[in-house]
Amino acid sequence: MNQSAVDKEKINFQPKKFNLWLFMITSFMLFAAFTSGFIVYTQGSADKGIKIILPHAFIYSTIVIVLSSFTMYLSFRSAKRLQFDKQKQFLWFTLILGVGFFFLQFYAWTVLVKMGVYLINPNASQSFIYIFTGVHLVHIIAGIILLINSLVGSYKNSPQVKNLFRLEMASIFWHFVDILWIYLYVFLLLNQQ
Amino acid sequence: METALIVNNSASVHRQEVNGHDEHHHHETFLTKYVFSQDHKMIAKQFLITGIIMGVIAMILSVLFRIQLAYPNTAFPFLQTLLGRFAPEGRLDPNFYLSLVTIHGTIMVFFVLTAGLSGTFSNLLIPLQLGARDMASPFLNMLSYWFFFTACVIMLSSFFVQKGPASGGWTIYPPLSALPKAMPGSEMGMSLWLASMVLFVASQLMGGINYISTVLNMRTKGMDLWKMPLTIWGFFLTAILGVLSFPVLVAGVVLLVFDRSMGTSFYLSDIVLNGAVLPNEGGSPILFEHLFWFLGHPEVYIVIMPAMGIASEVMAVNSRKPIFGYHAMVYSLIGITVLSFIVWGHHMFVTGMNPFIGGVFMITTLIIAVPSAVKTFNWLATLWRGNIRFTPAMMFAIGLVSFFISGGLTGIFLGNAALDINLHDTYFVVAHFHLVMGSAAIFGMLAGVYHWFPKMFGRLMDEKLGYLHFWLTFIGAYLVFFPMHFMGLDGVPRRYYAFTEFESMKQWLSVNTFITWAAIMSALAQVAFLFNFFYSIFYGKKATQNPWNANTLEWTTPVERIHGNWPGEIPTVYRWSYDYSKPGHDQDFIPQTVPFSQTMTSNLPHDFEDDPDVEKLQTEWLKQNSQEVK
């Protein structure tokens, strides 16, 4: 009886994880639309395009978010091995790196403004940089909320099934926003100048 | 594997907690049962009734602008009483006319035929026909409805702002939609339109994610994909379309909002407004059209595919025959799903598109005729020599096929890049899509309502009123939309307030009057439906468990729609859902829950999917019983 109850709970997690994957597909479609919009717009005439070298801040933020993905992985691995202290520790690292990424992107915007690359711009290819990073930051906020949720959960004495599930959801999504950023950054790099 | 192991080990420590969560204590209050319900059947009803109300509102809007088109020079004092400043001295304000057309289109396409149709029947039938207790995430499902409801409220609230609702057409092309000063409807009304649609898209994504997840994860034992009824295939592929295409609309709308509110120039360039040159430069309104129609075209299949699924099921049940070409039906739905993503350019032939690209879009568009024709052929073949029962649901399903054929034929004209130069933005287009996706999808939805009413409310709708409703609506729809083809061929443009100023179009005034009266007749016919629907909820004839003698799983649930759907275990499925009039069986239907071991007299070799052991059992049984069978 008890075992079947546990099984049921386990089964119930599966569709939720699946929902998350579907949600990530919708997010990906959103960015696919933005980037194809960029291509359609930029192909419009020769005076369109990014026309600048992207600020170095984007390199730093890329390093930070890749690192955070790695600490996320370590946290999840520790949780699976029942090393809960390590799980919390690495989760804290991930969270701090995530917030750091957020501010680095912000900083990159200020650099862009100093370079004279504004959001309100007759060359909307440059406005697209703000749209890509801005909408990506909205996803980062969602990811940070998930991280906080699993961090708070890890301090409560919740069942390991739940702990692991929460962490897995946060980790899948965090890796996703990481990969999403790399996609956007590579896309921008390929189109700069 | 590793994860699962640890899950089990550590779970034993916390077993109590997990177990405590598993037991559902339901203290249902009015609020949890009728308002914030997480039960998929209740959410389906909420979607249906909201959809019906929105449909009635959109219909009234259409009657209002039809009156203007029929009598452009006549004042109707009651219009001023009804609409106040929007109809000064009893004549519709031209700006308000545009609002009416815009909101009619928006409500019908999105709120009725997307949310009202998919929301109702996907929610109702996916768990019931697949054998699941509820959706994958009932909470998300509830949110989906309440986002939809809020979107409806916001959309309707735009009738109460000073300058009136959005009026740039349901496609909200910039620059009209991007410049608040462009026309009265582009101000507050447009902002509300955008806010409403953002909530609507969120609602659709939550719903769609749930539908896909439920179909893929929560089918009962034995229900493999090829045993699913065609309704489920329709809903499933519709949800996939929605999940892939709605985000693209969001992208387009985000850029639009930046243009509207922040001063960016994604879509705007070289505009002089009220004598002033706008600072926006370098944008391209065509970019918006690309993003919009990348959603917009799949959207019309989001509208029609659930209706197709419903019609297939209703026609098989009421013809007492297996659906003709089940696999072909599924593959044609898949074909439509895939093709729908590569045809959006046919809405943009006249935007200065490169003729070569126009040719590519033309070919992909015309290829859609193939899966569509497969479906039409299979429906007709299903009817062929069936024991047809003309229930109201069946009538509406056949009506769908009729509209789909007559509206689909004109699609072949419009998909042609050369002919489209002439036909673009004329009444020919209006006639085409009102038949092929408007009327056809509405008829699919109504077929579903008549067919599954007993499942939703435990009672039957009145058949006589159903026939009255059907014939008046069916004839009315043809009388409304058929003449429009000829207006379109003559070059009469859509969305015009009046045709009195154009010498060449004056001759169409009498036709417009005729169309308006036909529209009023079909609108009045809906009173028969509304009365029938709401009266039958409370006073209709009590339904039996399986009133249509259908095979699908939903008719194995008790009439009193309980939480969790089945009182005991979820039934197991042994066969597909179309074993109607199978030779050798004593009844003309065999529910999906009946194992082949109980139907030895009617089993056929292909039922066993080439399993030699079972086939052997069957042949041995036939040998032993050959005397009795004869």
Image (spheres, coloured by chain):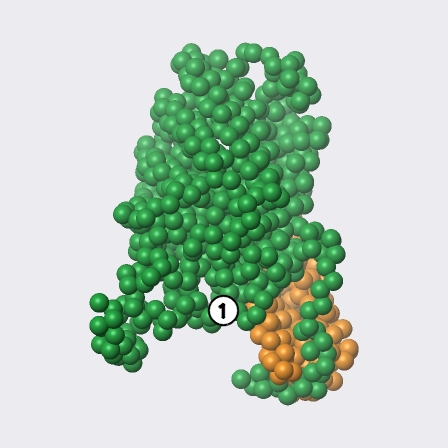
Chain colours: A orange, B green
Q: Is residue B423 left or right of residue A86?
A: left
Q: Is residue B225 visible?
A: no
Q: Residue B29: x, y in percent? A: 74, 56
Q: Residue B319: x, y in percent? A: 35, 49
Circle 1 residue: B571
Q: Is residue B244 above or below residue B351?
A: below
Q: Residue A147: x, y in percent? A: 70, 70
Q: Label 1's element? A: loop
For label 1, the crowd category at 10 Å Cα-Cα, with few meaning under 14, some 14 to 19 and many 20 or more, is some
Who is closer to the viewer here, B195 or B448?
B448
Residue ranking furthest to the front: B628
Q: Considering the image in quadrants, where does the C terminus of chain B appear?
A: bottom left
Q: Is residue B247 above or below residue B489?
A: below
Q: Is residue B99 above or below residue B214?
A: above
Residue drawn at x 50%, y 35% as measured from the top left: B465
Residue drawn at x 39%, y 24% as measured from the top left: B483
Who is closer to the viewer here, B474 or B367?
B474
**Number of marks in the image?**
1
Q: Residue B322: x, y in percent? A: 33, 56
Residue drawn at x 69%, y 83% as measured from the top left: B15
Residue drawn at x 48%, y 39% as measured from the top left: B463
Q: Is residue B386 visible?
A: yes
Q: Is residue B278 above or below residue B582?
A: above
The amino acid beneath tag 1 is Pro
Q: Quadrant of residue B353?
A: top left
Q: Quadrant of residue B8?
A: bottom right
Q: Chain of mark 1?
A: B
Who is closer to the viewer here, B563 or B18?
B563
Who is closer to the viewer here, B373 or A103?
B373
